[in-house]
Image (tube, rainbow, N blue to C red):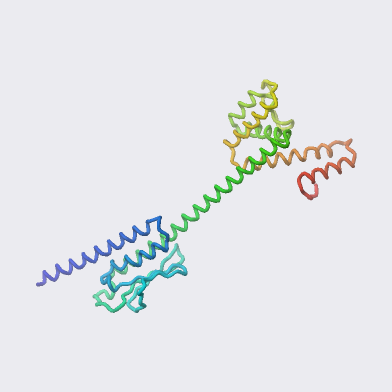
């Protein structure tokens, strides 16, 4: 008789253990399903978790996350309940409650088995980890989306500026392309060196920027070929520089070009005062700035 009772108790323990493991397995499957939103997961959890407890027909689960409450339609508040907080890192963001809708036989361990207590703590911990993981994933996706948008915007912006210069101000376009070529040359870009070696002084950097190889052969180029090479310079730049770097340099060189006539006027000792004033007014008109020159 004793052996039979012992065997029955062992069977009961194994059965309860199997229920707990099956419950935990289903919980993990739900939490790992990226196609489901958190509210969808919580709605499913309150259905499957009771099957991991001794009396699933009387067991009810309630999950609270932030301001949202997930509970079965016939949920009944009782004092036969166990509540465990849900933590996202160290911050409590809700709780999970397992309860019985009516009184059940208590074992030596109480209304809930020790393994059930451990199970609910494990589930609460896994829910918290999933919430944190989902939030982290969203932050990363938002960051990547913002980064792509900014990159696309800057890429679009520098291309628009360069194209506008090409169509409306050929001298400034060629000036910025030569500046870019020399910038790439100094940065060690192989293609820039090859362009300088091929076209020599026709595409040498503007006076005062430094010098390329003085032995470079000079080839007289047509307007079309010079523009083609200038276009190639920006194509090379797009392969070796970030869009932000290109945009920053183009802006800087345009400002330098606008300022050059002002510097010449001020530096020349023979420039009449009225011409210096005119140069300052021209500079302010071009830059749209009222900044005082110091």
Residue 168 picture quarter:
top right
Instruction: Give the percent coordinates (x, y) of residue 202.
Output: 70, 25
Q: Position of residue 21 (x, y in %)?
A: 27, 61
Q: Is 161 rendered above or below residue 54?
A: above
**Image check: 226 left or right of 52?**
right
Residue 71 image position (x, y, % from top left): 38, 71
* Up/down of 54 relative to 193, above or below: below
Side of 69 where 115 appears, left or right: left
Q: Position of residue 146 (x, y in %)?
A: 55, 51
- Left or right, 114 with respect to 162, comes to left
Q: Quadrant of the N terminus?
A: bottom left
| Residue at position x 18%, y 66% in the image | 11
Report how many numbered discs are placed on residues in the image: 0
To which quarter of the image does residue 177 belong? top right
Q: Nearer the viewer, residue 66 or 120?
A: 66
Residue depicted at 46% across the width and 68% down the height: 66
Is 50 positioned to the left or the right of 212 in the image?
left
In the picture shown, does residue 289 fall above or below 203?
below
User: What's the residue at 44%, 59% (across, down)?
Assistant: 132
| Picture quadrant of residue 28 | bottom left
Residues 193 and 131: in front is 131
């Amino acid at each position: 008789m004793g052996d039979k009772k012992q065997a029955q108790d062992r069977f009961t323990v194994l059965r309860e253990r199997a229920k707990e493991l099956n419950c935990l397995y289903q919980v993990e499957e739900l939490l790992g399903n990226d196609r489901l939103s958190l509210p969808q997961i919580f709605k499913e959890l309150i259905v499957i978790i009771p099957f991991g407890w001794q009396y699933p027909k009387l067991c009810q689960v309630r999950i609270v996350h932030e301001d949202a409450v997930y509970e079965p339609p016939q949920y009944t508040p009782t004092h036969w309940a166990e509540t465990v907080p849900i933590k996202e890192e160290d911050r409590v963001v809700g709780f999970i409650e397992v309860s019985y809708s009516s009184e059940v036989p208590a074992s030596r361990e109480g209304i809930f088995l020790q393994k059930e207590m451990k199970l609910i703590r494990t589930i609460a911990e896994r829910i918290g980890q999933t919430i944190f993981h989902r939030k982290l994933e969203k932050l990363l996706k938002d960051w990547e989306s913002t980064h792509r948008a900014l990159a696309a915007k800057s890429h679009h912006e520098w291309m628009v500026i360069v194209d506008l210069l090409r169509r409306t101000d050929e001298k400034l376009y060629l000036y910025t392309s030569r500046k870019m070529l020399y910038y790439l040359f100094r940065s060690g870009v192989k293609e820039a060196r090859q362009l300088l070696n091929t076209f020599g002084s026709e595409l040498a950097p503007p006076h005062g920027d430094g010098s390329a190889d003085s032995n470079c052969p000079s080839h007289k180029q047509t307007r079309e070929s010079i523009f083609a090479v200038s276009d190639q310079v920006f194509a090379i730049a797009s392969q070796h520089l970030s869009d932000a770097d290109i945009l920053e340099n183009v802006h800087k060189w345009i400002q330098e070009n606008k300022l050059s006539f002002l510097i010449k006027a001020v530096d020349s000792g023979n420039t009449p005062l009225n011409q210096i004033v005119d140069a300052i007014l021209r500079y302010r008109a071009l830059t749209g700035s009222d900044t005082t020159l110091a």
